[in-house]
């Protein structure tokens, strides 16, 4: 396994552990940190392992951080129409 894949696996484990603990702000601060770390990590995985691995890591991250993705999609739809 390459280093980016190992780091993305650790990112996924950390995101799941963070989700186990209660939070007053519904984990939004943790989501911002995870997004800030995850975006370059997806790029690195894609660069090192190809687009298929990058898409798989992106899908895994989006499944964990689904509410930011939903809100972003709603914002895009509002901007278009």
Image (tube, grey):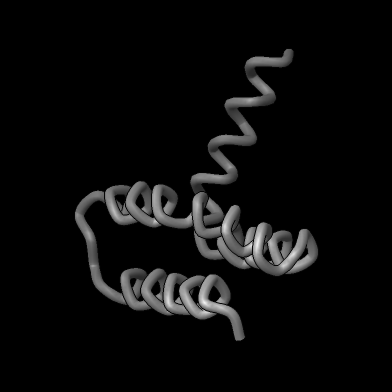
The reply, left or right, for residue 28 in relation to residue 46 is left
Residue 45 location (% of width, % of height) = 61, 64
Q: Nearer the viewer, residue 2 or 61?
A: 2
Q: Nearer the viewer, residue 55 or 43?
A: 43
Residue 79 location (% of width, % of height) = 64, 15
Q: Quadrant of the C terminus?
A: top right
Q: What is the count of numbered marks?
A: 0
Q: Residue at x 37, y 53 (%)?
A: 31
Q: Quadrant of the N terminus?
A: bottom right
Q: Nearer the viewer, residue 55 or 48?
A: 48
Residue 66 location (% of width, % of height) = 55, 55
Q: Residue at x 26, y 73 (%)?
A: 21
Above or below, 23 relative to 71: below
Residue 59 location (% of width, % of height) = 67, 61
The reply, left or right, for residue 77 in relation to residue 23 is right
Q: Residue at x 36, y 47 (%)?
A: 32
Splitting the image into 4 quarters, where does residue 72 fall?
top right
Looking at this view, name the residue that lies furthest to the bottom.
Answer: 1
Looking at this view, name the residue that lies furthest to the left.
Answer: 24
Above or below, 72 relative to 52: above
The reply, left or right, for residue 33 in relation to residue 39 is left
Q: Residue at x 40, y 48 (%)?
A: 36
Q: Nearer the viewer, residue 51 or 34?
A: 51
């Amino acid at each position: 396994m390459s280093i980016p894949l190992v780091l993305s696996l650790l990112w996924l484990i950390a995101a799941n552990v963070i989700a186990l603990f209660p939070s007053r702000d519904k984990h939004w601060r943790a989501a911002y940190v995870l997004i800030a770390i995850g975006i370059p990590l997806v790029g690195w995985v894609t660069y090192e392992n190809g687009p298929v691995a990058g898409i798989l890591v992106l899908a895994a991250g989006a499944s964990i951080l689904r509410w930011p993705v939903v809100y972003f999609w709603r914002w895009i739809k509002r901007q278009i129409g």
